[in-house]
Image (spheres, rainbow, N blue to C red):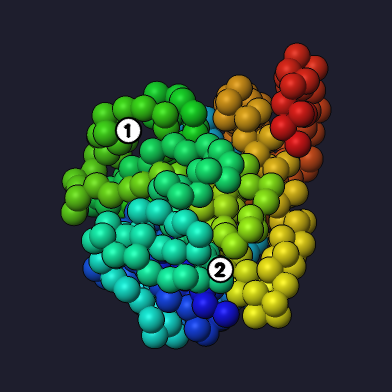
Amino acid sequence: MKVAVVGAGPAGLAFAGRYGDAEVFEEHLEVGLPRHCTSLVSGRSAQAVGIPARLVLNKFDELVVTDLEGRRIYFGVRDKVYLIDRPGLERWLAERVPNIRLGEKVTAVRSGYVYTSSGRRYGPYDYVVVAEGSARKLSSAYGHVVRLPGLQVDVKSDVGLRGITVVYNQKLSKAYFSWIVEIDKGLYRLGLADTCCTVDKLRKLVKLVRGTPVGKPFGGGVLAGPPLKRLVEGRTILVGDAAGLVKPLSGGGIILALRSGYAAADALARGRPLRYEEDTLATRLRLRVAFAAFRVLYGERLVDRLLAVLNGGDYVAVDYDDHLKTLLAAALTDPRAVVALKEALRYLAGNRDVLHLL
Ligand SMILES: Cc1cc2nc3c(=O)[nH]c(=O)nc-3n(C[C@H](O)[C@H](O)[C@H](O)COP(=O)(O)OP(=O)(O)OC[C@H]3O[C@@H](n4cnc5c(N)ncnc54)[C@H](O)[C@@H]3O)c2cc1C
């Protein structure tokens, strides 16, 4: 079977490396660049998908949720969080992919043919795997996924924060959150996603931590879901961000991109592409529930109320980048949980429509 892949990110490369005989189109001249991602993954998941230890740059076991105005919840992270070398991840995946057409931006896919901005037409292909990431130019025809502009910058700072800091403060992000990750001693990656004004807000965050930028700001679209209902439409297969396969509460999608690429390749190699949809059904259901939580926690800023209720707490985080699970676990191990639960129920009673998102 002749297969084309649009995009040489983790999803497209995982697919092509596992499938073995695919032609990959990548708009940039080098895989993994330009950078856009914070590059945090759970240690357990990184090991499960076989990310090599040499790509792990740092490990964290602390997470603080704060508004940077005095409220603060501390989490010890049970399963360490890894900061990975993201361009290195793509380079490593690309070692197993012999056929990558770099500098070829796909502009359309029609009747099994791939059209590129250089005016060429390739194909025909039996299947086209769309792995274009959060740009979602081709994949938007298959369903809507919430996308927020995300921006970050690395800074030197003596702020003294340890590990990962998640900031819920509407002055820095009204629709999502901002983050401060200790990359190395005195070196931090600051970032945020929001519906508007990310440049000004990032500047504010840099000022708050008395940071001196090292390097230029970088970023891209942070997706919040929901995952698409169909991942196989005729001869088109959608993987990774293109399929909305991201954690709605954190925007994390590296592991899901790898897993979806592998699952799609296995299904296609068996000649049963629909098996890919079946194999990802449970994950997609979980992500839809998380998407409903995203609407409640961030859309209605329930997260700010939870932070106020649980202020000062010290907990164990079950899953660092599943903020819902983390906050719920905190709530359930704290006597103040009753207050937190009442907040949630009061919200749901007044906003029953969010349940329809499931
Ligand atoms: C600011 C920010 C921070 C993030 N932080 C984290 C994090 O800490 N942890 C985490 O797990 N996730 C994070 N993510 C999400 C993560 O980066 C994505 O989920 C992941 O990259 C998805 O992989 P992908 O292969 O689907 O898409 P991508 O990595 O975006 O790869 C898509 C590839 O397709 C190429 N492409 C796009 N359109 C075309 C076209 N038309 N023709 C040819 N090539 C094309 C692109 O150049 C790119 O190489 C973050 C995202 C952002 C924006």
Residue pointed to by mark 1: 198
Q: CA distance from mark 2 to mark 1?
A: 38 Å
Q: Secondary structure at mark 2?
A: strand
Residue 194 seen anywhere in this rendered image of the structure = yes
> Which quadrant of the figure contains the C terminus?
top right
Residue 315 seen anywhere in this rendered image of the structure = no
Q: Quadrant of residue 54?
A: bottom left
> Are discs 2 and 1 less than 8 Å apart at CB?
no
Q: Dot 2: few (<14), some (14–19), or many (≥20) neighbours within 10 Å?
A: many
For discs 2 and 1, the disc positioned in front in the rendered view? 2
Is label 1 within 8 A of ligand 1 (CB to nearest ligand atom)?
A: no
User: x and y percent of residue 89 in the render?
Assistant: 41, 73
Res 43 label: none
User: x and y percent of residue 272 in the render?
Assistant: 72, 72
Q: Dot 1: few (<14), some (14–19), or many (≥20) neighbours within 10 Å?
A: many
Position of 119 compared to 317: left or right? left
Q: Secondary structure at mark 1?
A: helix
Q: Quadrant of residue 298?
A: top right
Q: Residue at x 50, y 43 (%)?
A: 140
- Does 355 sit above or below residue 317? above
Residue toward you, 260 or 230: 230
Residue toward you, 269 or 74: 269
Position of 118 compared to 237: left or right? left
Residue pointed to by mark 2: 127
Q: Earlier in the sequence, mark 2 or mark 1?
A: 2
Residue toward you, 185 or 164: 164
